Image (cartoon, rainbow, N blue to C red):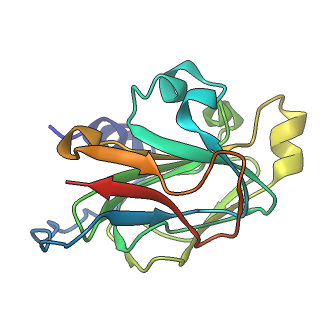
Amino acid sequence: MGFFDKFKKKAAETVSEKQAPAAPAPAPTAGPIVLTAPVAGSVIAMADVPDPAFGSEMLGRGCAVWPETETVVAPTSGTVSVVMSHAIGLTADNGAEVLVHVGIDTVSMQGDGFVGHVAQGDHVDAGQKLLDFDRAKIAVAGHKDCVVLAVSNSADYAAVELAVDAGATVAAGDTVLALTK
């Protein structure tokens, strides 16, 4: 049972979704695998994410971005494995399992302020729009709007490291994480 299976079960209970096709075996890569910023903004280390599950890296190593924009793009090419209003799970073409999660405790918003642009099973290219969110609605609901980028199968990698300094300002699509086998 993979990490995303518990999300798939929950999503299947609430929304009828098509099944994702089996992902092809990842191709061997030379050098580190990179993941890019899903939004423009200021990078923060995972330990500084204001949520115990993410901050302790329980859901995977990675980073987050305090957003300056309201559009989330794919940090890598892959197949959409989980779709929730506030989060997208991707199985990257290179084998990484990537969770992009908008906000802290935003699941309680029940989709208000979020517009998805992909469905489970879709193949996306790095930089492709995944979802839009409303920062003002997140703030009014009393939540933080950081966008978390977590590699849920971090144990499969010798290292998952920031490719930029914490505090750096990045554009969506700039490299933020390096994964080494």
Which residue is drawn at the image coordinates 14% and 69% (left, top)? 26
Quick one: 124 or 28, which is closer to the camera?
28
Quick one: 164 or 149, which is closer to the camera?
164
Give the percent coordinates (x, y) of residue 23: 17, 67
- Can you say which quadrant of the picture contains the C terminus? bottom left
Which residue is drawn at the image coordinates 58% and 38% (left, top)? 45
Which residue is drawn at the image coordinates 22% and 38% (left, top)? 155
Is residue 121 found left or right of 53 in the rendered image?
A: left
**Residue 128 in the image: above or below residue 163:** below
Q: What is the total number of numbered labels drawn onto the structure image?
A: 0
Give the percent coordinates (x, y) of residue 79: 32, 68
Which residue is drawn at the image coordinates 65% and 39% (left, top)? 110
Q: Is residue 120 at all visible to an observer of this figure? A: no
Is residue 63 found left or right of 155 in the rendered image?
A: right
Give the percent coordinates (x, y) of residue 47: 56, 28
Is residue 30 found left or right of 98 in the rendered image?
A: left
Q: Is residue 175 at all visible to an observer of this figure? A: yes
Determine the residue located farthest toward the top in the rendered image: 52
**Residue 79 in the image: above or below residue 140:** below
**Residue 173 in the image: above or below residue 158:** below
Quick one: 56 or 180, which is closer to the camera?
180
Give the percent coordinates (x, y) of residue 106: 67, 36
Q: Quadrant of residue 28?
A: bottom left
- Can you say which quadrant of the picture contains the N terminus? top left
